[in-house]
Image (tube, rainbow, N blue to C red):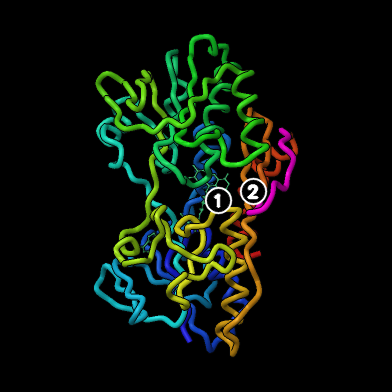
Amino acid sequence: MRVLIIGAGTGGLILANTLARKLSTSTEIILIEKSKNHYFQPGFTLLCFRLISEEFISRPVKYLLSKRVKLIQGEVKTLNPLTKEVTLSSGESINYDKLVISTGAELDWEKIPGISEGLYKGNIYEFYTLSGAKKLKEEIPRLKGGTIVSAIGGIPIKCPAAPIKFILLLEDYLRKKGLREKFKLIFITPAGQVLGRSPYAEKLENICKERNIQVIKNFQIKEVDVVKRKIKGEEEIFYDYLIFTPPHTIHKAFLEIPDFCDETGFIKVDSHRLQHKLYRDIFALGDVASLPTAKTASGTRLQAKVLAKKLSVFTGSKTEDSTIYDGEILCPVMTRFGKIMFSRYNYEKSLSPPKESRLNWMLHVWLGKYLYWQIFLKGF
Ligand SMILES: Cc1cc2nc3c(=O)[nH]c(=O)nc-3n(C[C@H](O)[C@H](O)[C@H](O)COP(=O)(O)OP(=O)(O)OC[C@H]3O[C@@H](n4cnc5c(N)ncnc54)[C@H](O)[C@@H]3O)c2cc1C
């Protein structure tokens, strides 16, 4: 029996390390990863504001993985769900009995015209990559005045709260520097709320109102004119600095398979069982999966635990297992320096009050990085 996992991100590493403890050695566990390093992506937002040092952001995958798991460095280029095999960029093909896809989401810089031409050089910035976060870390202390827009180019995105928390932290930063009056701050989203869930969305909208951050909802960006610094949609919005979060997609190896993804462009799995709706030996978790909840590391971790349990049953004699994922996620929304509101909910209901707290800040900003590297990735 062979379990093949693609992607050593949050989901792939937690799953592989948990399975390494759960499965007998008669089951082979293979993990394929295209990158040498694993990234702690929640740290990107923190890095922009110097709340984390770079040493906590990335580590080599090989040091994060149980020795029981075979690591193959390479990019999966194709998947054939009928013959149950994947091919790598090297040309090698590998077959599987059970496949887990945890390849995350990719950033689509080309979808909105103008963005890729203006990125980093035309006053367009981003913090969804390490290099983008590092550039913002240098740029933020140089800000002197003008209109700053934090805009989402398409949904769903990973950590849907990240663009609003960026502008809230920036507002607090400018206020503390005595520069707030020199700036107009705008938040743009194509969604009907600043965050996908009540009561957190309403709370955030009130905070934005109190702190004079303009919120523009239901705004689909069609194009960005880099020369005139103009965002074009139903109306035109001028910016001096645009902090842009691009639409997300997934690796084309999976997009090319007929009926493999749903209308949102993510892998269509059962939202409770994480099992592909057509191919019963394929599972997906994390950002690559089409789950009706927020794409977060916290949710991915819970999904990995559910899958580890399921796979330990499926690699034995049973074919049915009642363990389910209930959609739970926890998204820490940094509303100002020293304060975080946790938005925690599942498919059914909200699980935490919409309250800003200092304790939440300590848990996420001070403790989070240690928990992530030392506990969570190891599958605990
Ligand atoms: C700026 C930012 C802030 C965030 N803040 C938070 C937060 O505060 N809290 C929170 O819970 N979540 C947060 N997240 C979201 C969180 O990081 C992701 O939801 C989580 O990492 C998803 O895990 P994953 O395993 O699905 O994907 P990833 O961790 O992205 O891993 C995917 C892996 O697959 C590999 N891969 C891709 N394609 C292939 C291929 N074809 N072949 C081989 N390997 C491949 C990639 O190299 C990568 O290593 C944030 C994300 C960002 C960008």
Is residue 137 in view? no
Rate crowding at label 2 as few (under 14), some (14 to 19) or many (20 or more) other CA atoms within 10 Å: some
7 in the magenta segment:
no
Quarter of the rendering occupied by the C terminus: bottom right
Residue 25 appears at what percent x and percent y?
55, 86
The residue indicated by pointer 2 is 330
Quarter of the image holding residue 300? bottom right
Q: Above or below — where is 207 with respect to 89?
A: above
Q: Above or below — where is 20 with respect to 242?
A: below
User: Depth check: 21 or 350 in front?
Assistant: 350
User: Depth check: 27 or 375 in front?
Assistant: 27
- The stretch in magenta equals 345-356
At x 36%, y 22%, the residue is: 235
Of helix, strand and loop, which one carries label 2? strand
User: Depth check: 380 or 321 in front?
Assistant: 321
Quarter of the image holding residue 165? top right
Q: Earlier in the sequence, mark 1 or mark 2?
A: 1
The numbered disc on residue 5 is: none
Q: Above or below — where is 240 with respect to 352?
A: above
Question: Mark 1 near ligand 1 (CB under 8 Å)?
Answer: yes
Q: Which amino acid type corresponds to the residue marked 1 in the rendered image?
A: Thr
Rate crowding at label 1 as few (under 14), some (14 to 19) or many (20 or more) other CA atoms within 10 Å: many
The residue indicated by pointer 1 is 296
Is residue 17 in view? yes
At x 55%, y 50%, the residue is: 296
At x 30%, y 34%, the residue is: 115
Q: Which amino acid type corresponds to the residue marked 2 in the rendered image?
A: Leu
Of helix, strand and loop, which one carries label 1? loop
Q: CA distance from mark 1 to mark 2?
A: 8 Å
Question: Mark 2 near ligand 1 (CB under 8 Å)?
Answer: yes
